[in-house]
Amino acid sequence: MKIVACIKQVPDTEAEVKWDIPSGMLKRDAMDCVTNPFDEFALEEALLTRENNDGEIVAISMGPEKAMDVMRNCLALTVNEVKLCSDAAFAGSDTFATASVLAAAVKKIGDVDIVFCGKQSTDGNTGVVGAAMASVLGWSQLTYVSKIRSIDAAGKKIVVERAIEGGTEVVEAKLPAVVSVLKGINEPRLPNLMGIRKASKMEIPQWNAADLGVDTGKVGTAGASTKVVEIAVPPPRGAGEILKGEIEDIANTLTDKLIDLKVIK
């Protein structure tokens, strides 16, 4: 069974976010980055699937060379292969262009049975790349998956539980399929020291647009069907004010301030 795990490098939520205001793009190279937390669950589900079915895992990512760090983490977790889709032409791709590039990588890998990805990324939060990949590939689309009930590799079937409003639904689909998993579907493991040291010495293969057969006019800012019109950085928060005195006096002062700010009437 051939399994693909989609991994994205995202800015650390604890780090200062830096924007290129004119282009409306994040300055990713100037920020500390980590593995997208949702993709950690996708990678763990890929590892569990390999344990229960003979096969191999290929982790793929689209991003700059800096994304090699998250690829090495995949190798440290015993992923069989990694592929980094990296090309200057990919910069500024929207979700649909990103899905097209990742779908091209899946096609190039060949004979893939299942693709796992996180529900969304913490930088874009669109939650549509997995579904768009399935559409490009013409595969079964399984989103908001909270549990994998069974995978029948020989019979080319998968049964999952999907979280829906007010409950859960059980869905059976044909393989190959793209599966977007929810946070909490499993407990992601951590790499051990030996795995980290081994991965640090391994080369990370890169595929550019030509390798993938991707039309550069349909990716990046040139091919984006959606555009960032404006970026506004919120002003820094002012210093807070501590009210002192008797409780009744503090309550009256606080009420007056909230009325002045039109928070209450």
Image: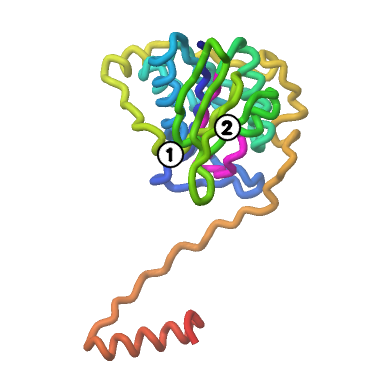
Query: What residue sits 55% from the left and 27% below the top?
Result: 64
> For residue 142, which numbered disc appears in the image?
2
Specify whether residue 187 is painted magenta: no
Considering the numbered disc 1 on the image, is that residue within a helix, a strand or a loop?
A: loop
Q: Is residue 208 left or right of residue 68?
A: right
Judged by depth in the image, the label closer to the viewer, 1 or 2, is 2
Q: Is residue 165 left or right of residue 24?
A: left
Specify whether residue 124 is painted magenta: yes
Amino acid type for the residue under numbered disc 1: Lys
Residue 95 position (above or below residue 194): below
Span colored in magenta: 114-129
Determine if residue 218 is in view. Answer: yes
- Label 1 – label 2 distance at C-alpha: 15 Å
> For residue 183, which numbered disc appears in the image?
1
The x, y position of residue 113, in whole percent, is 56, 16
* Magenta stretch: helix, strand or loop mostly: loop
> Depth check: 83 or 25 in front?
83
The x, y position of residue 105, in whole percent, is 62, 18
Considering the numbered disc 2 on the image, is that residue within a helix, a strand or a loop?
A: strand
Determine if residue 31 is in view. Answer: no
Q: Quadrant of residue 35?
A: top left
Query: What residue sits 54% from the left and 40% below the top?
Result: 27
